[in-house]
Amino acid sequence: MDRPLVVLDCETAAPMGAPHLVELAAVRVVEGEIEESFASLVCAPVPIHPESEAIHGIGDEDLRRAPLAAEVLERFRDWVGEDWMAAHNAGADTRILGFEYARAGLDPPPGPFIDSLALACIHIPEAPDHKLDTLRGHLELEEGEGHRALIDAVHCWQVIEECLERAGGIEAAWSSELLGRRPLTIAGRRPGPARLSPRLRPLEQALAAGEETTLLYAREDGAPTPITVLPRFLFERRGKSYLEAECLASGLLKTYRLERIRRVLVPHA
């Protein structure tokens, strides 16, 4: 290869909803060889869902001494620099990192992404499907601790390497149809800004000031209930706007739908 490539993988706390990193790992490939790696657990602000723990094997206890996401993301950005990146099903990883960089208020690495899933669909058509686990077995890749971020990043690179060989060279594999006219980037996958009606504007002020505030929030049965929270993040996802905030009654980070907030009361004293 004529340029370094950072191949990465993310593991998260839950299979659905706004993503929270629990592990980020990557390898840097230079002239076809892995030269260095990056790997870190991430202390997530939410409990790990049993379904996710069953996949990657990372539990809440494993993260007690792990650094917070903002620290890991800043180190990762500095480590990646201007290099291009790659991931298997890159749309998922760019979305995860887009959320986390937006939460942290940090600029992400600027490089475009190559998707090994898209490459495999074209250049490994005989595989039963193109999931990384399937390709791992189909290509008889060296076994490792599957579904941990670093080994998945290594296997992702090995899939890309196979695709490059089958494509007959870098130029064919790196064609514009594979990168796309608008290449995937982390910045391009950040969640949109929440749409706030005038009555919800105090949420922006509370978030900026780091102040607790009380919401009159409609429960599932429609009954409004006062909830005191510490706002952390406002965002839009799939056409709906949300507030991510620490519930002071439970101490847990929760996500609230803005359409259910009947009123924002005066900041909690």
Image: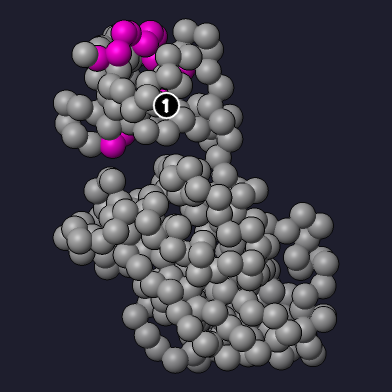
Asked which quadrant contains residue 90, the reply is bottom right
Query: Hey, what amino acid is under mark 1?
Result: Ala
Residue 241 sits above or below residue 136 on the image: above
Res. 4 in view: yes
Q: Nearer the viewer, residue 53 or 33?
A: 33
Give the residue at x 28% y 45%. Answer: 46
**Which residues are the magenta region?**
253-268
Q: Position of residue 166 (x, y in %)?
A: 73, 89
Magenta span contains residue 261: yes
Q: Main secondary structure of the magenta part?
A: strand
Residue 163 sits above or below residue 122 on the image: below
Q: Position of residue 9 (x, y in %)?
A: 47, 68
Q: Secondary structure at mark 1?
A: helix
Q: Nearer the viewer, residue 125 or 142?
A: 142
Give the residue at x 37% y 85%. Answer: 144
Q: Which residue is mark 1?
A: 208
Give the residue at x 67% y 57%. Answer: 184
Give the residue at x 71% y 91%. Answer: 165
Q: Nearer the viewer, residue 198 or 161?
A: 198
